[in-house]
Amino acid sequence: MRFQTPLVPARLIRRYKRFLADVQLEDGSEVVAHCANPGSMLGLAEPGMRIWLEPNDDPKKKLGYGWRLIELEGAFVGVDTSLPNRLLRGALEVGAVPGLNAYPQVLREQKYGQKSRVDFLLRGEGLPDAYVEVKSVTLSRQTGLAEFPDSVTTRGARHLDDLAKMVQQGHRAVMLYLVQRTDCTSVTLAADLDPAYAASFAAARATGIEVLCHGCDITPEAVILGAPLPFHMG
C-alpha cells in the first residue's frame, strides 16, 4: 500500500489524549497531528523521536497531518493500527497470504460469537470457513523480537475465546499477527503485560486455532506485506 501523499519528516514533541501529537516540522514550525493508534505505543512515543507524517488537504479532516511512521536506528515502525486490515484485505483477495490462499471469497467485519466482529471471514467451496482475526504488533523490548500486546486488552482476550468456539464448531480460526516493524524476525506474547491474554491464547490454541505471523516492508513511500515470521511462546 502506497501512501496517498508523500510523507514528510518531523520530530515528536509529545503524544496526548491517545489520538493527538504535537510535532515539529523540519522548518521549525509546530503542528498537531492525528495519531491513528489507541494503544499504549510503549517505547514508541518518546519526545524527540524522528517520525513521518502524511499531509492532507481534506476539508472534512480537522487536522492537516496524520502520524504514519516512526524511524528508529535503521528501522521503521508503522503507527496506524487501521493499516493492517487494509493491507491484508488486498493480500487475501489476490491469494498472497500463505495458508489462506485457497479462499476466493473474502468478507470483512462479519458478526460472530457473543459481541464480536471477525476481521475477515474466508469462504470457498468444499473448504471450512476460516475466521481470521488480525492484530497489529509494534512492541519490541528485545532485539529482533516483536511482542503482543503492548498493554492489557480484554477485547483481544474475548476475540481468542470466540475464535476457539469457531474451531469447536468445525471451522478454521486464525490469529494473524502483523508486525509493523522492520527490525523484528520473530513474534511472541508479552505475557508479563497481560497475563489474562496469554492465558486465553494458550486455551484457544489448545482447541486448535492457528497462528500466523507476517512482517512488513516499510518505507516512507509504502507499506508492503512481508515474509512470514516464526512465533514462539517464549
Image (spheres, rainbow, N blue to C red):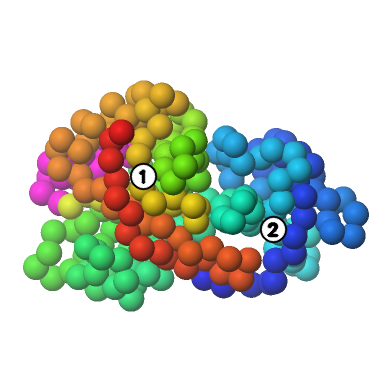
Q: Write the start and end of the magenta stretch as one range.
A: 159-171
Relative depth, front residue between 179 and 35: 179
Please tell me whether residue 197 belongs to the stretch shown in magenta. no
Q: Is residue 46 above or below residue 60?
A: above
Residue type highlighted by circle 1: Val
Residue type highlighted by circle 2: Trp
Indicate the position of residue 61 as horizontal and vertical percent values.
Answer: 73, 59
Q: Quadrant of the C terminus?
A: top left
> Does residue 117 appear anywhere in the picture?
no
Disc 2: CA contacts within 10 A as few (<14), some (14-19) or many (>=20): many
User: For residue 187, which numbered disc appears in the image?
Assistant: 1
User: For residue 52, which numbered disc appears in the image?
Assistant: 2
| x 62%, y 50%: residue | 72
Relative depth, front residue between 206 and 234: 234
User: For residue 81, which numbered disc appears in the image?
Assistant: none
| x 47%, y 68%: residue | 224
| x 15%, y 35%: residue | 206
Please tell me whether residue 160 belongs to the stretch shown in magenta. yes
Indicate the position of residue 230 as horizontal and vertical percent values.
Answer: 29, 50
What type of secondary structure mainly makes up the magenta span? helix
Q: Secondary structure at mark 2?
A: strand
Relative depth, front residue between 139 and 33: 139
Tell me the quarter of the picture where residue 123 sits: bottom left
Q: Are marks 1 and 2 in contact (CB under 8 Å)?
A: no
Left or right, 179 with reference to 48: left
**Real-space CA distance between mark 1 and mark 2, rounded to the nearest whole angstrom:** 25 Å
> Does residue 127 appear anywhere in the picture?
yes
Q: Is residue 171 above or below residue 60?
A: above
| x 59%, y 45%: residue | 37
Check the image and name the residue furthest to the right. 28
